[in-house]
Amino acid sequence: MTATSSKPSQPFKVLCSYAYFRGHNFGPLLESVHQSPALVFGDSGAHSARTLGISLTLDGYAAWCHRWDQRLALYANLDVIGAPEATWRNQRALEEQHGLTPIPVFHTGEPWSYPGSTRRSASSATGPSSTASA
């Protein structure tokens, strides 16, 4: 059986995690997987980093987002699982100090009362996070 797409003009879409790709050139990987341009969603990989004991920095993630700006169609905030205030501080720092426009991250079970939970900027969209609190 051959798999066919109902929308053959759809671009190739992929999620790349900063936690895994922070020290690698993922351009050749994308080109080897798919010939046409890909829509790349940059994710901080906070959940993976947390479970693997990897330390991520805001400055490092911001530099990665800037480095791959031409490849990233969008990217998420560097979230801090279980600490919505820290996640919101990261959002503001990425916007104000680094000139980035990350998608805000909100985790299930977090209070709606912290500032970032009700904010929605014109340049970014809020969506559910696949990162679950452990």
Image (spheres, rainbow, N blue to C red):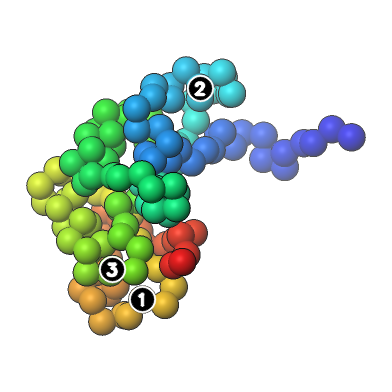
Structural crowding at the residue carrying mark 3, measured as other residues with C-alpha within 10 Å and reported as few (<14), some (14–19) or many (≥20): few
Asked whether residue 80 appears in the rendered view, the answer is yes
Mark sitting earlier along the chain (1/3): 3
| Residue in view at x 20 percent, y 73 percent | 115
The residue wearing badge 2 is 29
Q: Which one is nearer the viewer's eye here, 102 or 88?
A: 88
- Check the image and report above or below for 80 versus 20: below
At label 3, which amino acid type do we have?
Answer: Ala
Of the image marks 2 and 1, the number of the one nearer the N terminus: 2
Percent coordinates x, y for residue 68 in the rendering: 32, 30
Residue that badge 3 annotates:
83
Kindly report the distance in space between the C-alpha atoms of the residues bearing marks 2 and 1: 36 Å
Q: Eyeballing the image, is 133 above or below 123? A: below
Measuring from the top left, give residue 94's x and y in whole percent.
19, 49
Q: Amino acid at mark 1?
A: Glu
Front-most of residues 9 and 95: 95
- Residue drawn at (24%, 49%) of the image: 101
Q: Which numbered disc, 3 or 2, marks the residue that appears first in the sequence?
A: 2
Are discs 2 and 1 less than 8 Å apart at CB?
no
Residue lying furthest front: 53
Rounded to the nearest whole Å, what is the CA distance between mark 1 and mark 3?
A: 8 Å
The residue that mark 1 highlights is 110
Residue at (47%, 17%) from the top-left corner?
Answer: 28
Q: How far across and how far down the image is residue 51, in percent?
A: 45, 53
* Quadrant position of the N terminus in the picture: top right
